[in-house]
Amino acid sequence: MARRFVTLDVFTDTALTGNPLAVVLDADGLDGPAMQAIAGEFNLSETVFVLPPDNPRHRARLRIFTPKAELPFAGHPTLGAAVCLALRDDRAQRTDALAFGLEEGIGTLACIVEVGAGRGQARFRMPVLPEFVGDGPEPEALAAALGLAPADIGFGRHAPSRHRLGPDFLFVPLASPEALARAVLDPAAFAGLGSPAPLYVYTPDADAPGRRFQARMFAPHLGVPEDPATGSAAAAFAGVMMQFEAMGDGTHDLVLHQGAAMGRPSEIRVQLGIESGALHAVEVGGSAVIVSEGTLHV
């Protein structure tokens, strides 16, 4: 059967940067093993499959796969699929923005999308909030896994921590952009950290004002040696900010730059809503641009 697919670069407005994504349309009838095999064929950080929604009020149901595993949620497939679907919606020619729901393993994500010629911007609101899972490993173990010195681990009040929003992530603050650039994952030392979780390292962006950070993400156990942009980690990073930063009530905007070390610069925008000292809303936003379109004969 012929099935349409589109590839996009996500969390960027420039083709051949950002995080590449494959969107398989007409995915109805494919089972999980077939989707996993197709994701392995594309061999990108993630491939997303578009299915009819369970609730007809929503736009689509999504299943998301890395080259090795299915995920209940991932950010760049959500944003890329939202832009791709909006570009194929006749209403996009008659309105400034489209709003629709995308069903995923963690619930329904409310999306707002604006599109132009082969590109668009989107933001989505998380149906659940980040969950603190526990403290991270000792700095010595993390430094060994990253090819760094223990003194490179941590800045300000930030310490290694685990947070979950869909997947679990191990967040590791680094003392400087130089340490971030020097990080090289040691697979054996990474495996010795315990339960496998994507390793997200971050540091303040010294060259930019406001709450801006540089980041990298490693997930070799998922078939992703390094990811150019990780929207699910960016959403979970809201939990890191709540744990280690003094943030008052109101709306707070973050910018995360990722992928520079890979030559795939990406920008992810995160908005936190805080009421009575508690996190009550997380939104993730960014841009995406179509790179290719084609047909799968499977």
Image: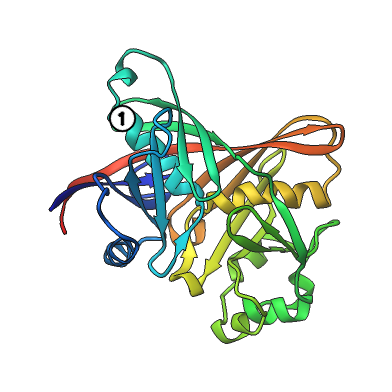
Front-lying residue, 129 or 177: 129
Q: Specify whether residue 103 is in view.
A: yes
Residue nearest the viewer, comparing 149 with 158: 158
Which residue does the image show at 52% across and 37% down from the upper left?
109
Q: Residue at x 56, y 51 (%)?
A: 232
- 78 w.r.t. 194: above or below: above
In the image, what residue type sits under mark 1? Leu
Identify whether 151 is placed above or below 258.
below
Colouring convention used in this rendered image of the protein: rainbow
Q: On the rendered image, what quadrant is the C terminus found in?
A: bottom left
Residue placed most toward the observer, 238 or 39: 39
Instruction: Please provide percent x and percent y for residue 99.
Output: 46, 24
Residue position for label 1: 87
Mark 1 Cα shell of 10 Å, populated few (<14), some (14-19), many (≥20): many
Q: Residue at x 53, y 53 (%)?
A: 230
Q: Quadrant of residue 192?
A: bottom right
Expressed as whole percent of the image width and height from the top left, the position of residue 144 reads 68, 82
Residue depicted at x 50% and y 47%: 75
Describe residue 195's horizontal placement relative to residue 295 as left or right.
right
Give the left or right position of residue 16, taking residue 105 as reference: left
